[in-house]
Amino acid sequence: MISRGNLVNAALFQVTWFACVLGGAAGTSIWGVGALAALLAYSAATPHLKADLLFAVSLGLIGLGVETLWIKAGVLEYGAAAIAPAWIIMLWMGVGLTVNHSLSIFSGRPWLGGSLAAVAAPASYLGGERLGGVVVPDPWLLALIAGAWFVLFTLAFALAGGKLDLRGRQAYERAH
């Protein structure tokens, strides 16, 4: 059963998605700032704040790199932007604030979460295009994005579920 807290987190993320995309279409990131602040305030009221911040910052940095790569490769266009605009980075950060909450169902099944992320990614970008936030010059190239999201989010859910330990603690414990 989905908890009330996870429903709140999911609803706040949906508000963040629309605020970021519609704000981006309007040429402002301020809408996304407000919505992301509400999502962060929710996280601050939970015992997961430290992990949430780690996921939010990490995914924000990954989003900056990945989205800029998509711009340079001609997969996506954000107006005349040469690097990922602030609103899309905030959107990636918003996703990071859901990993331990509304998306935590996938921490025990990272492959399933990664697979659903791969399906959701093209839909999200096409929805963003319909709202004027992004241009997808060739929809077939969304397969690249789907593949990247599969890998990134399979790893994110594995980290959240403790199935992947970047510090090597599990490998050390198994050896001793």
Image (cartoon, rainbow, N blue to C red):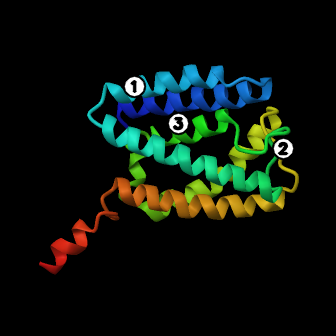
The answer for how far apart the CA atoms under marks 1 and 3 are is 11 Å
The answer for how far apart the CA atoms under marks 3 and 2 are is 21 Å
Q: Tell me which residue sits at (74%, 55%) in the image.
A: 70
Q: Secondary structure at mark 2?
A: loop
The picture quadrant where one finds residue 128 is top right
List x then y, in percent, for residue 170. 23, 69
Residue that numbered label 1 is attached to: 42
List x then y, in percent, for residue 95. 52, 41
Circle 2: is it few (<14), some (14-19), or many (20+) Cα within 10 Å? some
Three-letter amino acid code at disc 3? Gly
Residue 167 in view (yes/no): yes
Q: Tell me which residue sits at (43%, 40%) in the image.
A: 102
Circle 3: is it few (<14), some (14-19), or many (20+) Cα within 10 Å? many
Q: Tell me which residue sits at (47%, 47%) in the image.
A: 58
Looking at this view, name the residue that lies furthest to the right. Answer: 137
Residue that numbered label 3 is attached to: 94
> Which mark sits nearer the N-terminus, 1 or 3?
1
Q: Which mark is residue 135?
A: 2
